[in-house]
Amino acid sequence: MNLFQLGDFTLSSGRKSDVKIDCDALSDESIQALAWMMKRMLLPFGTVEGIPQGGLRLAAELAKHSLPTSKRHLIVDDVLTTGASMEKARDKYLHQPDRIVLGVVIFARGPRVPLWIKPLFQSYYPL
């Protein structure tokens, strides 16, 4: 299994791509290192939510770095293409004024990333 794969792929967003980013190929040690890097670029956060399936391992690792007194909620995914799954997860918190929602992803595909989401790596490769 390789992190980057060439072929004919249908992404979870429904879009077609000739490049797949498969974060299941990342080792547990790589996920730990990525979580550490993300923790350093983010404001303190209290709770963590992973987008199934891709964000679950990373969310579990990031939760180890949470600050329980923080009112910030972190939504985590591995790869962002359209941002739809992140936006859907965020919608649950729109009517909770005491909750600040942040997002983080390992990879963002393309130049358009919602302002509330921070990518660790961003590709400008067109879909």
Image: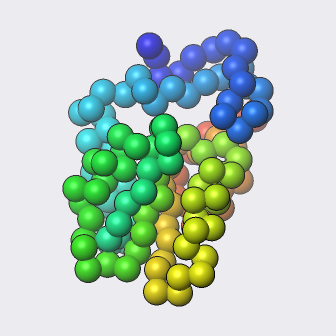
- On-image quarter of the N terminus: top left
| Image height of 77 relative to 89, above or below | above
- The front one of 41 and 74 is 74
Residue shown at 72% from the left, 24% from the top: 10
The part of the image, by quadrant, that contains residue 34 is top left
Residue 104 on image: x %, y %: 48, 56
Residue shown at 32% from the left, 71% from the top: 46
- The front one of 89 and 126 is 89
Residue 37 seen by the camera: no
- On-image quarter of the C terminus: top right
Q: Is residue 47 left or right of residue 101?
A: left
Residue 21 on image: x %, y %: 55, 28
Residue shown at 63% from the left, 67% from the top: 91
Q: Is residue 69 left or right of residue 105?
A: left
| Image height of 24 relative to 42, above or below | above
How was the colour assigned to the protein in this rendering?
rainbow
Residue 57 on image: x %, y %: 35, 40
Q: Is residue 59 left or right of residue 7?
A: left
Residue 114 on image: x %, y %: 65, 61
